[in-house]
Amino acid sequence: MSESYAEVIVRDEKDVQGKKLGVFLMIITLILLVYGAMFQTLFLMLGIFMIPISFSTLKNRYREYEYLLAADELDISVVKNKSKRKKLATYALSEMQCMAPVGSHRLDSFHSNPQLQVRDYSSGNQEHTIYSMIFASQGMLQEVKVEPTEAMLREVRLHYASLVFSE
């Protein structure tokens, strides 16, 4: 098989509620600190206690998924706060059963399997084209949701044309 290479970076947009919670906690902390400094020491102590809690909720809220297609493997990593990179999974394309857009009728037979495990590495934005890749390895069936670029789709389609659908 010839060498193929594609790299895609996708920003995770699914954690909107967590971001709202972090901002809310920061505002409460600020109010406690100001009120405590002006009127009562108890509120100042609560505000100081809330500082690490509110910062920890904001920590690691910015995430990007990185897909690296090299040869016959798809490596998926997460980059948190544009500084910490962690490899999440590696999938062999030779074990791929199907690749189609989410909601395609081609995936219906796989979705009826109760052992199907779903891994979502997409942005979560419904306006983007999200694909499901079905992998069968070691007796497990996994659905991996990704947002490939046209270059990545072209590379996968080049080697596994009968498994890639774009309907």
Image (cartoon, rainbow, N blue to C red):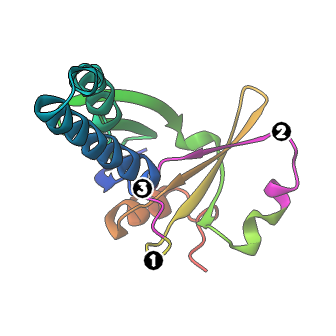
- Using the image as rendered, state which of residue 18 and residue 45 is in the foreground: 45
Tell me: residue 8, above or below residue 61. below
> The magenta stretch spans which residues?
109-125
Q: Are marks 2 and 1 in contact (CB under 8 Å)?
A: no
Query: Circle 2 is placed at which residue position?
Result: 115
Instruction: Name the kind of residue labelled 3 in the image.
Output: Val
Query: Circle 3 is placed at which residue position?
Result: 16
> Which of the two discs, 2 and 1, sits closer to the camera?
1
When asked about the image quadrant of residue 154, the answer is bottom left
Query: Could you tell which of marks 3 and 1 lies nearer the N-terminus?
Result: 3
Image-based side of 18 in relation to 130, left or right: left
Residue 123 lies within the magenta run: yes
Q: Residue 165 in the image: x percent, y percent?
A: 60, 71
Query: Circle 1 is placed at which residue position?
Result: 127
Q: Residue 5 in the image: x percent, y percent?
A: 30, 49
Image-based side of 156 in relation to 109, left or right: left
